[in-house]
Image: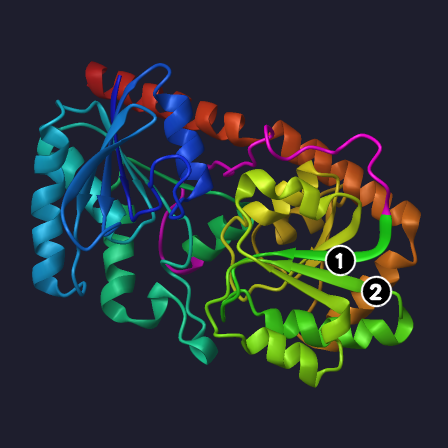
Amino acid sequence: MRIALVVPGGVDPPGGERVIPFVHHLVESLVEQHQVTIIATGHDTEPGEWSMFGAPVVNVPVGDHGKVDIGRVLYEVPRAIGRHGRPQVVHGLWANLPGLAAVVAARRFRVPSVVSVCGGELAAVPAIGYGGGLRDGTRRLALLALRGATATTVATEWMRQHVQAAGGRVHEVIPLGADLRHCTVAAGTPPRPQHLVHLAGRNLVKDQDLLLRAFALALHDEPRLTLTIAGGDTLAGHHEQLATELGVADRVEFLGHVPHDQLAPVLAGAALHALTSHHDAGPLAVLEAAACGVPTVGTSVGHVADFAAMRTPAAVAVADRRPATLAYAITQLLADRPRRDALSRAAHSWATQHDAAFTASAFDQLYRRLAARSANA
């Protein structure tokens, strides 16, 4: 099949810094059987073309996202796709501009379209100014893409509810799984029963302030507790300063950005992975930790909410965003090894069954169904 993917970026060639891991793995898997063209809307500020896993990548600059810029992108994306042959399916990853561009291109070629809500396209968190749902224009753009798509997907049941509550429609839940080539339980790894790990870029959405304040409270009950935070800093050292103010700087290790293929040693032996996001559609970190045998405790978003609601729970979701609530959940789990082990087994089982290969296969099957239906129409 000829498949066109429209993405916002994250498509540096392997080894580059600007990488969205699940996009990379999806392309790497699809090119084994299909002809894939990737259109990046705004990966760079200038037009450009390169190759990723043998598939052509075309960058279409966006500008300041004004109406003129959006109109230009909606015009240029179908043209860029057409230069590499008429597609049979067009898939937009993120239901804002990439999603709408995918729908427009699919209609241009009279083929089916898929739009995946991958993040905060419809979210609204006024306290931190986050989410496409805060502005009428961006919210309507995402809803227009979802309504125009032949099929729509999200990564979690939590996200399905979020999108539907915002007025969007969802046809399928397809998790964006971890790459098991890099996320495994290392044999003979010594346990670190008083160690927490947090995997996320440091920004307002991931809310590491909540994590550090909860950690400081948990230290009162577990004085041997340590924390590693792996993620690039976008807040100019704010969290190092907060750790110092809270008196926990000597118990917290800040690693900065760690490539996904190097996360397993960071997770090895940790007691818990903590996630404190205001919003997270399908946090890959939860699945990467689970694949490495580390269960998650955190805010009720994405996979944390889904895992906590399972008949056999695979995570612990806290009831509110107070540091004391998260601290209590952490200390209770640290003191309950059997419960922690049960969470770990359930999370590991789910994550290894729904890994990156599962994701690629699920999308492949969706493309084939849509293309077959279109051919028979």
Q: Is residue 188 above or below residue 220?
A: above
In the image, residue 107 lies in the stretch drawn in magenta:
no
Asked whether 260 or 309 is in front, the reply is: 260
Residue located at (71% from left, 32% from top): 349
Which residue is denoted by mark 2 in the rendering?
225
Q: Which residues are magenta?
A: 165-191
In the image, residue 167 lies in the stretch drawn in magenta:
yes
Q: Is residue 360 above or below residue 91?
A: above
Q: Is residue 373 above or below residue 216?
A: above
Mark 2 and mark 1 residues within 8 Å of each other at the beta carbon: yes
Q: Position of residue 324 (x, y in %)?
A: 76, 76
Q: Position of residue 258 (x, y in %)?
A: 55, 50
Distance from disc 2 to disc 1, alpha carbons, whole Å, reads: 8 Å
Which residue is denoted by mark 1 in the rendering?
196
Looking at the rendered image, the quarter that the N terminus falls into is: top left
Asked whether 49 or 337 is in front, the reply is: 49
Q: Position of residue 151 (x, y in %)?
A: 33, 36
Asked whether 55 or 257 is in front, the reply is: 257
Q: Quadrant of residue 77?
A: top left
